[in-house]
Amino acid sequence: TYQGVATHYDAADGNGACSFGPSADMMIAAMNTADYETSKACGAYVRVRAASGASVTVRIVNECPGDCAVGQLDLSVQAFAKLAAPAAGRIAVSWELVSPADAGTLSVRYKTGSSQYWCGIQVLGHRNPVARLEVSNGGGWLALPRTSFNYFLSEKGSGCGGAIRITDIYGERLTVDGIAVRPNAVQATRVQFAGH
């Protein structure tokens, strides 16, 4: 459990630094830079509790600018309103990672401009934060570097269009195959991480 403060921002359509696109559910938040960890926090579900006892579960879709302190969450106005009146502006909170029960299955998206020679791969709809993404490259697995905009890049094209292995922060590994290089198309899988 982390201690910190919650502030709020106008989240507009819910898109943010995590590059998920517009969000149908506005129970979302931006994570401070230290805890954002170069987008490792993207897609994480966080239960936020106020001193009053009120709580809300939000999904991390954005990075809070540099003036956010370690432990701080910048909630959408809609999410903040579940804890306190938005006029309060800033309140003390505690927060913790949670695994939602109704997560469905995860999806994969190749970045616009991806081909067999260069690709960016993004994981969507994951129950737990993604720690690592690897691609099959012949006889083994190649870990791809993660960007601050939440894609894993294969700059030389290694593994683009092949099997993908995704590991969550708890060490569970899921392997998905048959995901074609179709730029900006959300492709469903049949797998999901276990709850914690």
Image: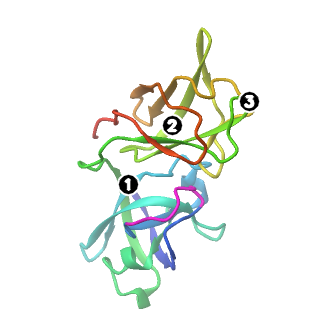
Q: Is residue 85 left or right of residue 138?
A: left
Q: Amino acid at mark 2?
A: Ala
Quadrant of the drawing holding the C terminus = top left
Label at residue 117? 3
Check disc 1 and report its element: helix, strand or loop.
Answer: strand
Region in magenta: 17-24
Mark 3 burial class by Cα count in 10 Å: few <14, some 14-19, many 20+: few
Judge whether residue 70 can be spotted in this image: no
Alpha carbon distance from label 2 to label 1? 14 Å
Check disc 3 and report its element: helix, strand or loop.
Answer: loop
Vertical placement of residue 185 versus 174, above or below:
below
Residue at the spot of label 1:
45
Q: Earlier in the sequence, mark 2 or mark 1?
A: 1
Label at residue 131? 2
Q: Amino acid at mark 1?
A: Tyr
Q: Earlier in the sequence, mark 3 or mark 1?
A: 1
Coordinates of residue 156 in the picture (x, y in percent): 76, 28
Is-magenta flag for residue 59?
no
Mark 1 burial class by Cα count in 10 Å: few <14, some 14-19, many 20+: many
Q: Main secondary structure of the magenta part?
A: loop
Coordinates of residue 115 in the picture (x, y in percent): 69, 35
Vertical placement of residue 114 versus 70, above or below:
above
Alpha carbon distance from label 3 to label 1? 34 Å
Is-magenta flag for residue 22?
yes
Coordinates of residue 96 in the picture (x, y in percent): 36, 55
Alpha carbon distance from label 2 to label 3? 24 Å
Residue 26 lies in quadrant:
bottom left
Q: Residue at x 56, y 55 (%)?
A: 18
Q: Earlier in the sequence, mark 2 or mark 3?
A: 3
